Amino acid sequence: MTLTSEPVGESGDSGGATLMGWNVAVGNFFFRYRNGLFPGIFLFVVLVARPGVMFGSPVFDLILIVCGAFVALTGQLVRLFTIGFEYIHRGGKDGQVYANRLVQGGVYAITRNPMYVGNALIAIGMTMMAGSPAAYMVVIPFFLFVYQAIVSAEEEYLRRKFVGEYEEYSAGVNRFLPSWKGVRSLFSTMPYDWRRAVRKDLSTIMGLLIGFIYLPVWRTYFLQGFAAAKVAAVRALILSLSAATLYGLLLYLKKRKRLF
């Protein structure tokens, strides 16, 4: 049974079935273009959103930025933990949802969508660091809507392909919220491959680092003016060049299959 083929009873639940089908269709659409979500959101924040000192309190604003950085880093750690314990190919096939096996081990034994949880935490954390009311009202709701739609599309596909097996898996593991009962067995029985984690998630790590470097410059420009932003931009340029050099080195080692 799938989300789109559920029979309508005498009471008539066609509205709910139609809504589910629409949600899946939206999820399939965004799945095809999901790799552009982070760049698109970043571009929106830069061009449209404007930062502010939250509630007029510099102290509260600083706390919000620090908390945002912590949330974003937590999201990155979730991704690294997930990939290091059991990697799953989520790239799809020909722009569509695809899976050749149902992954249930590693972090997937704790939550069914750990990578999306990590992505959501990164997006929320970076939005908190931006300190823009417009970003709060648009970016976070939009991002959460897109990912729940993608998850719905993936779930429909998995129900179709892994009949019975996916139903049993989803009955014991939450969609997003982790179930901590399997954590001890995860760390005690599965080896962690940190090389694979870094290799597979290198671009996300560098993207997050660039965001950490340039978001303060963007905030400085709007809150303190061009002169202050110019000084901040010089520091950011030095840091970004260092990051680019490190990224290039890691890419070289990756292609040469050294270290990774």
Image: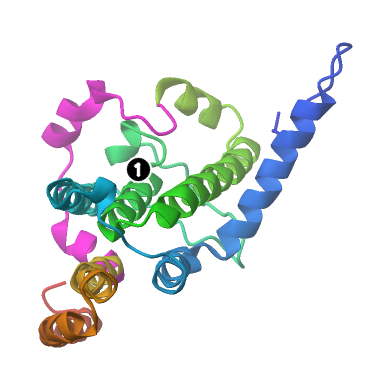
- Pick the front one: 121 or 86: 121
Q: What colour scheme governs how the chains and residues are painted in the rendered image of this protein? A: rainbow
Left or right: 34 in relation to 201: right
State the residue at coordinates (45%, 74%). Answer: 47
Whether residue 70 is visible: yes
Residue 164 percent across, percent down from the top left: 58, 26
Q: Is residue 36 above or below residue 173?
A: below
**Image position of 32 with respect to 112: above or below:** below
Q: Residue at x 30, y 60 (%)?
A: 130
In the figure, residue 213 lies in which quadrant? bottom left
Q: Nearer the viewer, residue 252 or 214?
A: 214
- Image spot of residue 210 (x, y percent): 24, 73
Q: Is residue 176 left or right of residue 246?
A: right
On the image, numbered disc 1 is attached to which residue?
Answer: 114
Label 1: element kind = helix
Principal SS element in the magenta part? Answer: helix
In the image, taking residue 12 as reference, residue 50 lies left or right, namely left
Residue 176 on the magenta span: yes
Residue at horizontal 86 percent and vertical 18 percent from the top: 12
- The magenta span reads 174-203
